[in-house]
Image (tube, helix red, strand yellow):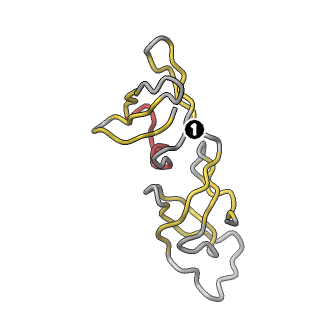
Amino acid sequence: MEYLYQDGDHYVFMDNESYEQVNIPAEMLGDRIKLLMANAKIEVLLYGQEIMGIELPAFLELEVSETDPGEKGNTVQNALKRAKLVTGAEVQVPMFIEVGSVVKIDTRTMRYIERVSK
């Protein structure tokens, strides 16, 4: 299904084959919803009309919209800083990541994997 928009405490998704829309409660999605942008695809497990579960893609590539600049001379291995993604989610990234960088995020752990060249 394709993520369309938020409607109060529910998120609206559309079946790409039948064009039916389904409202999924926010609590079923948890913090992972912060990784979704409009038109993102997810797997939805249905039993009749009842939603049994959801599965996001294992990895998403998202742009960094806010982060502190890396400190010059900081040579500490594996040093991390906070970064806000264009979707509003916050993750920890290495010091060399800058605003505008595209990063690969593991949706199961909400952790940085690597910087993506685009």
Q: Nearer the viewer, residue 54 or 21?
A: 21
Amino acid type at circle 1 is Leu
Q: Residue at x 52, y 32 (%)?
A: 1
x then y, percent, for residue 19:
45, 27
Q: Residue furthest left?
A: 8
Q: Residue at x 47, y 49 (%)?
A: 37
x then y, percent, for residue 103:
62, 61
Q: Residue at x 44, y 39 (%)?
A: 30
Give the quadrant of residue 27: top left
Count all numbered tags in the image, as a single digit.
1
Q: Tell me if residue 44 comes above or below residue 112 in the rendering.
A: above
Q: With 73 as the anchor, is 90 left or right in this view?
A: left
Q: Tell me if residue 20 comes above or below residue 59 in the rendering.
A: above
Q: Residue furthest front?
A: 18
Q: Secondary structure at mark 1?
A: loop
User: What residue is pinned by disc 1?
Assistant: 56
x then y, percent, for residue 117:
70, 66
Q: Residue at x 61, y 72 (%)?
A: 97
Q: What is the quadrant of the C terminus in the image? A: bottom right
Q: Tell me if residue 104 comes above or below residue 30 in the rendering.
A: below
x then y, percent, for residue 2:
50, 36
Q: Nearer the viewer, residue 61 or 33?
A: 61
Give neighbour class at mark 1: few <14, some 14-19, many 20+ (Cα, 10 Å): some
Q: Residue furthest bottom?
A: 73
Q: Nearer the viewer, residue 65 or 109?
A: 65
